[in-house]
Structure formats: C-alpha cells, structure tokens
Image (spheres, rainbow, N blue to C red):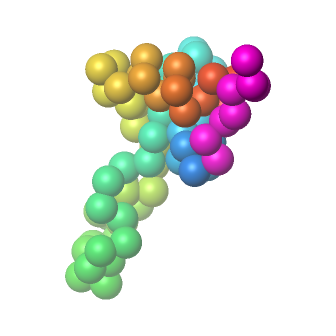
Amino acid sequence: MPKMKTHKAAQKRFKVNGAGKLMQPVGPKGHLRRRKSARVKSQLDRMVLTNQSNVKRIMRKLLPNGV
C-alpha cells in the first residue's frame, strides 16, 4: 500500500488552531477589493472555523498527516 500524501493546496489553505479545530480563510477576498471598505477588507483577512460537515473529509483525504 503506497503512502498517503498530503494535498499541498489544502495544506496551504487550512490551519489547525490551538484547540485542534480546523480553520480556513474567509471567502471572496480578491474580487472587487478596490470597492470594499477598509473594515470589510480587514475582516476578510482573518481565518474562520471550517464547517463540521467538511472537517472529516478534509482531514481524512486531503490532510492525512495533519497540517
């Protein structure tokens, strides 16, 4: 059986926080960024918790060795 490899794009997008929960960046960051206010742009730069329905799939298939 070959080794399970980490999906490199997923490794760059997802991080695990101190509590062990999976975090991901907020959605539409780059599109029409000039028009957005500074407050909205700073809110888009943070990480948010990944939906629990996706965590199992991401950790099992894309990030088998952790982040």
Number of numbered discs overlaid on the protein picture: 0
**Residue 6: image x %, image y %?**
67, 36
Position above or below: 19 against 33: above
**Residue 45: image x %, image y %?**
45, 56
Quadrant of the frame with the C terminus: top right
**Residue 14: image x %, image y %?**
54, 39
Q: Which residue shows up at 40% across the image and 37% down it?
A: 48
Position above or below: 8 against 64: below
Q: Nearer the viewer, residue 50 or 63?
A: 63
Position above or below: 33 against 29: below
Quadrant of the frame with the N terminus: top right
Q: Which residue shows up at 55% across the image and 33% down it?
A: 62
| Quadrant in the rendering for residue 38 | bottom left
Query: Residue lying furthest front in this view?
Result: 1
Q: Is residue 51 left or right of residue 49?
A: left
Query: Residue lying furthest bottom in this view?
Result: 34
**Residue 64: image x %, image y %?**
63, 23
| Quadrant in the rendering for residue 29 | bottom left
Q: Nearer the viewer, residue 33 or 60?
A: 60
Q: Is residue 15 magenta?
A: no
Position above or below: 55 against 40: above
| Quadrant in the rendering for residue 49 | top left
Q: Which residue shows up at 61% across the image and 41% down it?
A: 7
Q: Main secondary structure of the magenta part?
A: loop
Q: Is residue 2 magenta?
A: yes
Q: Is residue 43 left or right of residue 64?
A: left
The magenta span reads 1-8
